[in-house]
């Protein structure tokens, strides 16, 4: 099946901590079938299932699957499934890392509700096909009902608020393709701080911050920082991806998450100074995911380093823009300390989200971009990275794998970079550089574990020179002890003899 659209209609009851309503799933069936299968957490109770308007039998099992056995075979073509359900959704144990619902209260005692489910999947609160390879290409509609006085923040654009007795229904709609874990809502006693942002391509997009009433006076400065990050990210990765909707931000009780057109922000306005300017690392990182995760999506969790690693490289670009190239270089050098090299970044072609998700996909992923930048040079590297973020074959409805990234950069380089991608992404090995003294002032420098020539800085008594070094090696003359790659463009092991 190919998922086209989700419609969520849910009544949210903060005092009971329940949700009740239905989800409609529109999809194209690619071949005839007698059975349909969806993901849905077993802790919520299904009351009825319809397929194209007719009720059908189903089973809902402890392994979080809904199996619909059809009375008659369903031919290929458009299908609409509606599932009515309700109950108490699972509580987040440690949001956003261990997700679920958070039924919190703000300092005035108003309900403050958030959902996170990047690891768990959206199946924790609505029935869906829970795999990154199949996003709803025509977007999603959400009709969320809450007690009057509370505000619902969601993806896309707010269509309408309907008040009925003591309840309000917020209709949020996105027409863009969207990851399942971004189809969600936040509830709180929010006010909206707004301005218009003009993108790098001249489009005007509303920038909106759903901020707790009690923090409203802090909103303007946060929007200033949001704009500052927008300028940096657009410079490297191209125009903001969702110009027909909004640049959204919502205050949450958890640290943050990259929810499309409604970034979750919970960093409590704790800014640091970068190059003498205020900077919010959480805001910048989650915003970077609008490009890396939401616009450029990995086809399988196996390639999650693309989302986290390149997004983290975007954080380093903020250092470069605000504090300069030297600060960026220092930051990259410092980052090597945190790289564990316990697991490769890519652990197979298809793996589950738990195996894919480990710390190195951030730091080592970003460092790999730093290495590529050095190998290709800025004139080739930056336009190629921007191409990955803007070319139709990698974005929106299309998804990417590590092989796609490798082919793109190899093409731009004019030579295969496959050995380099293999070493740093598919193994935990470092680049091994052998430095052997062959005479009084003579050295042989060679690579031990890579079948391609790489540019390395070699520092001698005559200064630093960029040299192409391979397994055969290169002879270097120096009266002083030579240094290889002193600025640290590679994760490497130097072996002296
Ligand atoms: Zn991230």
Image (cartoon, rainbow, N blue to C red):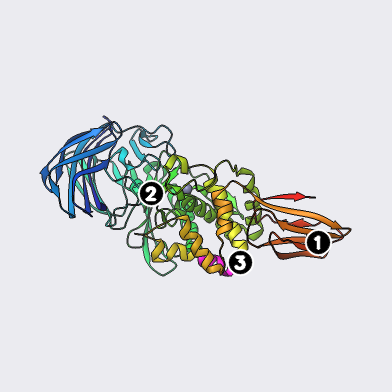
Q: State which region is magenta.
A: 376-384
Q: Please say if the residues under marks 2 and 3 sit with CB atoms less than 8 Å apart.
A: no
Towards the viewer: 99 or 266 = 99
Q: Secondary structure at mark 2?
A: loop
Secondary element at tag 1: strand
Point out the residue furthest to the top here.
16
Q: In the rendered image, is residue 410 in sight?
A: yes
Q: Secondary structure at mark 3?
A: loop
Mark 1 and mark 2: Cα distance apart in space: 50 Å
Tell me: is circle 3 under 8 Å from ligand 1: no
Report x, y in % for residue 429: 62, 47
CA–CA distance in space, label 3 to label 1: 22 Å
* SS majority, magenta: helix
Quarter of the view holding residue 13: top left
Sequence order check, earlier mark of 2 and 3: 2
- In the rendered structure, are the residues bearing label 1 and label 2 in contact, judged by CB atoms less than 8 Å apart? no
In three-dimensional space, the C-alpha distance between marks 2 and 3, rounded to whole angstroms, equals 33 Å
Residue indicated by mark 1: 460
Give the residue at mark 2. 259
Foreground pick, 478 / 279: 478
Q: Which mark is residue 377?
A: 3
Camera-nearest residue between 88 and 368 = 368
In the rendered structure, does residue 2 fall within the stretch colored magenta? no
Q: Residues within 10 Å of mark 1 (few under 14, many from 20)?
A: some
Label whose residue precedes the other's in the sequence (1 or 2): 2
Q: In this rendering, is residue 470 above or below 249? A: below
Identify whether 285 is placed above or below 39: below
User: Position of 449 compared to 436: left or right?
Assistant: left
């Amino acid at each position: 099946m190919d998922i086209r659209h989700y419609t969520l209609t849910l009544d949210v009851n903060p005092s009971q901590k329940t949700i009740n309503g239905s989800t409609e799933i529109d999809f194209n069936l690619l071949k005839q079938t007698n059975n349909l299968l969806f993901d849905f957490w077993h802790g919520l109770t299904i009351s009825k299932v319809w397929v194209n308007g007719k009720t059908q039998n189903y089973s809902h099992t402890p392994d979080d699957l809904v199996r619909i056995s059809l009375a008659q075979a369903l031919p290929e073509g458009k299908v609409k499934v509606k599932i009515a359900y309700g109950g108490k959704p699972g509580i987040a144990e440690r949001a956003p890392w261990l997700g679920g619902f958070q039924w919190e209260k703000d300092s005035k005692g108003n309900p403050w509700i958030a959902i996170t489910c990047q690891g768990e999947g959206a199946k924790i609160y609505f029935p869906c096909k829970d795999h990154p390879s199949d996003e709803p290409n025509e977007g999603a509609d959400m009709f969320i009902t809450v007690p009057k006085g509370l505000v619902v923040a969601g993806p896309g654009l707010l269509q309408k608020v309907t008040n009925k007795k003591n309840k309000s229904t917020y209709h949020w709609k996105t027409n863009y393709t969207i990851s399942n874990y971004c189809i969600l809502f936040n509830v709180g006693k929010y006010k909206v701080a707004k301005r218009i942002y003009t993108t790098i391509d001249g489009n005007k997009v509303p920038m909106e911050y759903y901020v707790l009433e009690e923090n409203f006076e802090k909103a303007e400065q946060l929007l200033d920082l949001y704009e500052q990050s927008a300028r940096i990210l657009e410079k490297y990765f191209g125009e903001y991806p969702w110009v027909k909707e909004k640049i959204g931000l919502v205050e949450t009780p958890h640290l943050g998450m990259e929810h499309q057109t409604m970034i979750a922000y919970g960093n409590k306005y704790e800014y640091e100074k970068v190059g003498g300017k205020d900077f919010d690392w959480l805001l910048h990182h989650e915003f970077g995911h609008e490009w890396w995760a939401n616009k450029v999506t990995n086809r399988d969790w196996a390639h999650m380093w693309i989302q986290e690693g390149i997004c983290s490289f975007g954080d380093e670009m903020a250092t470069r823009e605000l504090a300069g190239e030297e600060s960026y270089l220092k930051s990259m050098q410092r980052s090597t300390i945190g790289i564990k090299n316990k697991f490769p970044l890519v652990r197979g072609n298809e793996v589950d989200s738990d195996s894919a998700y480990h710390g190195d996909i951030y730091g080592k992923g970003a460092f790999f971009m730093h290495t590529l930048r050095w190998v290709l040079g800025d004139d080739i590297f930056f336009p190629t990275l921007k191409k990955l973020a803007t070319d139709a074959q990698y974005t929106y409805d299309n998804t990417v794998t590590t092989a796609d990234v490798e082919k793109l950069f190899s093409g731009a380089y004019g030579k295969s970079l496959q050995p380099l991608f293999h070493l740093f992404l598919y193994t935990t090995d470092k680049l091994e550089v052998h430095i052997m003294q062959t005479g009084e002032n003579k050295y042989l420098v060679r690579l031990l574990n890579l079948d391609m020539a790489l540019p390395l800085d070699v520092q001698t008594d005559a200064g630093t020179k960029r040299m192409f070094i391979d397994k055969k090696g290169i002879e270097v003359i120096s009266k002083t002890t030579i240094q290889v790659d002193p600025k640290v463009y590679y994760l490497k092991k130097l072996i002296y003899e």
